[in-house]
Image (cartoon, rainbow, N blue to C red):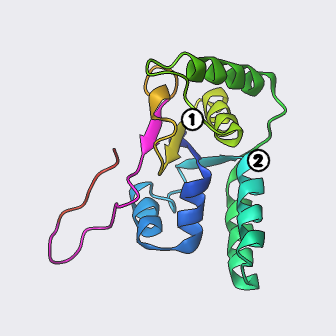
Amino acid sequence: MRGTLYLLDTNVLLALIRGNELGKFIRHTLSVENTATRFLISIVSHGELWAIAERRNWQSNKRDALRTMLDRVVTIDLNANEIVRSYVEIDELNQAAQKGARQVSHNDMWIAATAKASNAALVTTDQDFLHLHPHYLVVIYIDPQSRLASATTGNQPGIQ
């Protein structure tokens, strides 16, 4: 049985590595340990994460956690015609946005193009991709303030 297919944005991967409350919420909500769920990432995220690790002088234990996480997901290279076509389409959509041209980083455009070409839902904690949802690709936005339910309140915000 084929599971759900998600492409994780770099900010989602960063939260998972940090293991903070947001990371715990994402891990729980997406059932990260469920083997029926398939997680993809763009090779672009590799570059972004290793650049962050270098800039912030991550220690070896955190770099090891990054390496382990990257080994557990399927990395999609950019060298595919469908990804390049999707990138061009996203650029056109950004330029034609109703409220004027949208400024989206080239890295984010490659990540969105990879999700589109892979027919995966793009999971993110920022709102840079929301203008593409639902007509161009499925975007699952997780509010960075999301937390697991506490024992006292019993409420848990859902994925938006």
Residue 1 seen in the current view? no
Give the alpha-carbon distance from disc 1 to disc 2, as whole Å: 15 Å
> The residue tagged with tag 1: helix, strand or loop?
loop
Residue ID for mark 1: 120
Residue 29 image position (x, y, % from top left)? 39, 57
- Three-letter amino acid code of the residue under disc 1: Ala
How would you classify the magenta stretch by its main secondary structure? loop
Residue 86 seen in the current view? yes
Identify the residue at horizontal 70%, vertical 26% (top origin): 87
As rendered, which of 149 and 2 lies closer to the eye? Answer: 149
Residue 34 image position (x, y, % from top left)? 50, 58
Residue ID for mark 2: 43
Residue 133 image position (x, y, % from top left)? 45, 28
- Three-letter amino acid code of the residue under disc 2: Ile
As rendered, which of 119 and 146 lies closer to the eye? Answer: 146
Screen quadrant of the C terminus: top left
Sequence order check, earlier mark of 1 and 2:
2
Identify the residue at horizontal 74%, vertical 78% (top origin): 57
Answer with left or right where residue 99 lies relative to residue 106: left
Label 1 CA crowd tier, 10 Å (few <14, some 14–19, many 20+): many
> The residue tagged with tag 2: helix, strand or loop?
helix
As rendered, which of 38 and 54 lies closer to the eye? Answer: 54
Q: Which residues are magenta?
A: 138-154
Answer with left or right where residue 71 lies relative to residue 12: right
